[in-house]
Amino acid sequence: MLEDDIDRLLPLAHISLEEPPADKAEAIEYLLDLIADNGRVRDREAALDALREREKEATTGVGMGIGIPHAKTAAVEEPSVAFARSSAGIDFDAMDDEPARLLFMILVPEEGGEEHLQILSALSRALMHEDVRETLLGAEDEATVQNAVREAVN
């Protein structure tokens, strides 16, 4: 299902191997800008507001060094995923108190509730596997990240 969509959901332009800001709020904006800079966000402030509201509801630090900030918002027209990684880790208020080193952002249109859950669950399941996390942490180029995600959600 999702493996065919990885190129659309997570294009190479949405993958950063640069060090993101060490602050959670700034890291969320950094991920948002990867998507916005690719022309997929109609209203950056509205998207950011939706992400901040979602963070207030419950942390998106899922544990095992993973943060998945996500939101449904009318500010985007198509589902999009962005990726960055942090060598030191960012405090995402995870239940296991581990800093998030792998960061994925999921943005879907307001009416994309079902797809939002499918993307989130497929990604969460994939990231449970240590080999997937290790591949993402060690990836030397964007294509390696994209391929690892494609194979992992298969």
Image (cartoon, helix red, strand yellow):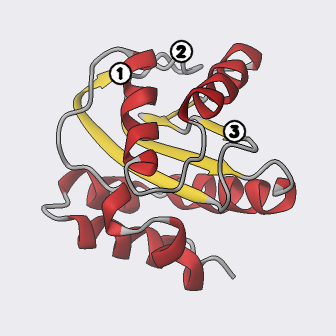
Label at residue 93: 2
Total numbered badges shown on the rendered structure: 3
List x then y, in percent, for residue 35.
45, 50
Residue bearing the label numbered 1? 90
Compared to residue 48, the image places residue 93 above or below, namely: above
Compared to residue 118, the image places residue 86 above or below, namely: above
Q: What distance separates the C-alpha of mark 3 from that of mark 1?
A: 19 Å
Q: Quadrant of residue 80?
A: bottom right
Q: Quadrant of the N terminus?
A: bottom right
Q: Type of residue at label 2?
A: Asp
List x then y, in percent, for residue 98.
42, 22
Residue lying farthest to the front in this orientation: 42
User: Around disc 3, counting alpha carbons within 10 Å, would you say few (fewer than 14), some (14 to 19), or many (20 or more)?
Assistant: many
Q: Earlier in the sequence, mark 3 or mark 1?
A: 3
Residue at (62, 48) in percent of width and height: 107
Q: On the picture, is 63 further left or further right than 24? A: right
Q: What distance separates the C-alpha of mark 1 from that of mark 2?
A: 9 Å
Residue bearing the label numbered 3? 71
Q: Secondary structure at mark 2?
A: loop
Q: Type of residue at label 3?
A: Ala
Q: Earlier in the sequence, mark 3 or mark 2?
A: 3
Q: On the picture, is 18 further left or further right than 42? A: left
User: Around disc 1, counting alpha carbons within 10 Å, would you say few (fewer than 14), some (14 to 19), or many (20 or more)?
Assistant: many
